[in-house]
Image (cartoon, helix red, strand yellow):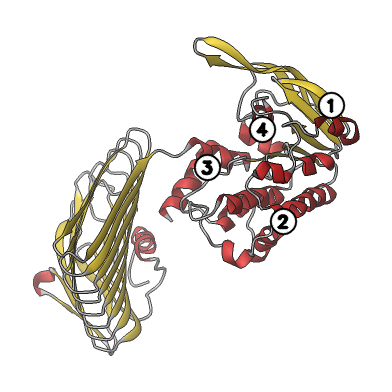
Amino acid sequence: MLNLDEIQKSIMAEVADLTDVPAGAYNFRVNSKLAGRHTTENIDISSKEQGSGIDIFIKPNTKNESVHIPVVVSDSGIKETVYNDFYIGDNCDVVIVAGCGIDNCGEHDSQHDGIHRFYVGKNSRVKYVEKHFGSGTGDGKRILNPVTEVYMEENSTMEMEMEQIKGVDSTERNTIAELKANSKLIVKERLMTHGSQNAVSGYKVSLNGEGATADVVSRSVARDNSSQTFNACIAGNAPCSGHTECDSIIMDNGKILAIPSLEANNVDAMLVHEAAIGKIAGDQIIKLMTLGLTEAEAEEQIINGFLG
Amino acid sequence: MLELKNITFTVDDNGGEKRIIRDLNLKIDNSRFVVITGPNGSGKSTLARIIMGIEAPTSGKIYFDGKDITDLSITERAKLGISFAFQQPVRFKGIKVHDLLRLSAGKELSVNEACSYLSEVGLCAKDYVNREVNSSLSGGELKRIEIATLLARRTKLSVFDEPEAGIDLWSFQNLIRIFENMQKDIKDSSIVIISHQERILRIADEIVLLADGEIKKQGSADEILPELIGTTAAVNACDKLM
């Protein structure tokens, strides 16, 4: 696959499930440089000035196509802020796979701050998958601070799967979304922190048009001495419906702060929030042990299922 | 197969000591269908949990196929061939019915194989195999899935803690058929059921009547059942609903 070393290849597999160049459009960024790009008749990718990011243009009526834009940071000490803007035309149906992996074997911190902006056209459907991953044995920290902005036109749908399961020392994630009439946003966030990691995840979803809906669901696990903050606000500014849920498992000396909030600015806004934090139930472990699993295996199955 | 020797189980009771099981001795041979019954609070469920290793006896010894398993963990006992169906099955967010059956079987399980276990317990397999074992399932559905996990386990000794509770009356006969098939399918296997349902007591090879943590009577269904009818140790299924 292109000209990647083994570590870079393994990160690519982790963050984008890629073992080879994907079908469709792609843009690979490795250690702040372009490592491969492919465009299609309907999907164009162009670089912003001075390597500060890319613009992705998806023509109206593009259906069943995908764009992969994985990022790999394997040199210690890289700090970068990258702006990627997605312009999705009307009546599209596309899959966008992003993801960033940092392998840091050095003593300097490595940091990638990806700022993604999505402009989703009328009647379009977008599935967005983003995985964050860290590896390496160095003392340097692996830091990811993604910002995601989503602007949705009428009748559009955006489904976002965002996952950070392992190895990222510090993350501060901010997502904002603005929805016009009858548009629909579905967010599934999966987060696990371990060691002394810290993760902050904030959402501000504004339901501005009649019939707009949002469902923001986060499942997280905080183990060892890690800490997490989940802060999701759904604002209903029109007759709309919104739901946010934060469901967390806390282990060891983990700490979790969940702040789901709702803001109703219209009498016909129907908004619901739920939050639950708890340790793994003893009965769950016992049940799996009666099936022949060890306590550690049982715990792993429960966490994998919960985050699955 | 299973032998309990001088089992005592005590708990703290406001600074004092309360005996739940008192110096109990019980032997269960191969290929037996044993029902342990008794009034509420007689220690039936505690005894079942002691067999599986969920509770440790205060004193006494437990032998399984001649091996002392008193100090073995739940996992070790499960691997030796003991399985346990909970009275109140556990729910798991995110774990699917198929996953639970796969873990029970201890190997990869095709959808068809998973479905065959579900069909066996009267669940329309395709509707359930990919569902999460979470609060969207009713108590009765969970109970049947719990029984399906034991079918997938295929162990020499299966312990069921009140398997009929929450299961609709129409499936009672099916439940009994499941127990009979389990014994047929697994050579020398035995089943221990905690129950006070008359219909389950009727099919027992052996009934053990427990009261105040002690065995009060033990024998065949013909011997024991007539004395139990009308007591809380053997209730009619319809009475239980009232």
- Spatial separation of the CA atoms under disc 1 and disc 4: 21 Å
Give the residue at mark 4.
Answer: B52
Marks 3 and 4 share the same chain: no
Packing grade of label 4 (10 A; few <14, some 14-19, many >=20) is many
User: Which label sits in the foreground, 1 or 3?
Assistant: 1
> In the figure, B110 relative to A247: above or below?
below
**Rendered-image quadrant of the N terminus of chain B:** top right
**Residue at left 60%, top 30%?**
B54
- Spatial separation of the CA atoms under disc 2 and disc 4: 30 Å
Identity of the residue furthest to the right in this view: B222
- Spatial separation of the CA atoms under disc 2 and disc 1: 30 Å
Secondary structure of the residue carrying numbered label 4: helix
Q: Number of numbered discs present?
A: 4
Identity of the residue furthest to the left in this view: A49
> In the figure, A4 relative to A48: above or below?
above
Identity of the residue furthest to the front in this view: B242
Report in which chain the residue with disc 2 lies.
B
- Spatial separation of the CA atoms under disc 1 and disc 3: 37 Å
Going by the numbered disc 4, the residue's amino acid type is Met
Going by the numbered disc 2, the residue's amino acid type is Trp
> In the figure, B205 relative to A186: above or below?
above
Instruction: Of the two numbered discs 2 and 4 on the same chain, state the one appearing first in sequence.
Output: 4
Residue A201 in sight: no
User: Which label sits in the foreground, 1 or 4?
Assistant: 1
Secondary structure of the residue carrying numbered label 1: strand
Report in which chain the residue with disc 1 lies.
B
The location of residue A287, given as percent across then percent down, is 58, 41
Report in which chain the residue with disc 4 lies.
B
Going by the numbered disc 1, the residue's amino acid type is Gln
Packing grade of label 3 (10 A; few <14, some 14-19, many >=20) is many
User: Which label sits in the foreground, 2 or 1?
Assistant: 2
- Spatial separation of the CA atoms under disc 2 and disc 3: 35 Å
